[in-house]
Amino acid sequence: MKTIALISQKGGAGKSTLARQFSVLAGEEGPSWIIDRDPQQTSARWHERRQDGDTPPEQPGLIDLGGTTLTAAVAALKAQPGTLFIDTRPAVTEPEAEAARLADLALVPVRPSLDDLEAIGATLDMLRRVKTRTIIIINAAKNERRAIEARAALSVHTAAVCPHHLADRAVYLDATVAGLGVGELRGAAAVAADAELRRVWTWIMKEAAE
């Protein structure tokens, strides 16, 4: 099983949103799972809402660690097919380092604001120390210009930066409330969000395979 950790010291960067949305896309190809290590449990609550319907989607599944350690849970899943997403707290202390060490890939969402761009250094320093392959994703961009400027600012770091960005869209909030992926919603806004999300996910999978 491929393990992907969503990590960022900055709160509100989009870790939980991307963990949920990417897990839905990964679930189209095979089993996908989420482990929610954020005390706010936003991904776990989204999954609960996802189970409320008459025919809840099979993917993704949610793993409750209970008394099990993250290391033990990941080890138990390692030989199985599919993709595991670890949603972490907005921090870069030992729990996040543990998730990074266990991951095949770390995804670092960052909003294209000065505050967020300046705060990303501590996250990347930790990931570099534990030697986890890292991809930065520009998330919630207000427009193309801000995304381009953010990519230029991030070019000073050694981590790969996804050449595609995710726009700031209200439909992600709708998907959160409904316990769905944006591609499972109707309407033009959902179609546009799904297209850009798939573009980013496809690039990530190609980059990770190299």
Image: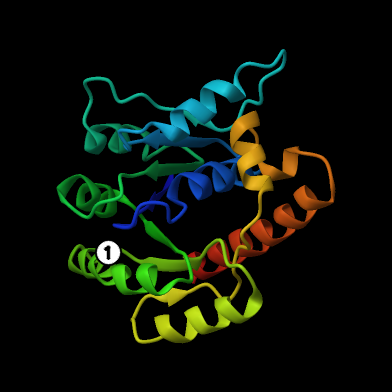
The image shows residue 65, relative to residue 154, as above or below, that is above
Give the quarter of the image for residue 154: bottom left
The image shows residue 153, relative to residue 201, as above or below, that is below
Of residue 70 and residue 50, the one placed in the foreground of this image is 50
Of residue 79 and residue 207, the one placed in the foreground of this image is 207
Q: Which residue is depicted at the point 43% across and 43% down?
A: 85
Give the quarter of the image for residue 109: bottom left
Q: Which residue is depicted at the point 63% across and 16% down?
A: 52
In the picture, which quadrant includes the N terminus?
top left
Specify whether 160 is left or right of 66.
right
Tally of marks: 1
Q: Residue furthest top?
A: 54
- Applied colour scheme: rainbow
The image shows residue 134, relative to residue 46, as above or below, that is below
Local packing at callout 1 (Cα closer than 10 Å; few below 14, some 14-19, many 20+) is many
Image x and y of residue 61, in percent: 51, 28
Give the secondary structure at mark 1. Answer: helix
Image x and y of residue 30, in percent: 60, 39
Of residue 173 and residue 17, the one placed in the foreground of this image is 173
Q: Which residue is depicted at the point 30% across and 68% down?
A: 119
Disc 1 target residue = 123
Image x and y of residue 155, in percent: 41, 85
- Residue type marked 1: Thr
Specify whether 57 is left or right of 157.
right
Q: Which residue is depicted at the point 46% across and 44% down?
A: 16
Of residue 151 and residue 170, the one placed in the foreground of this image is 170
Image x and y of residue 188, in percent: 84, 51
Specify whether 29 is left or right of 92.
right
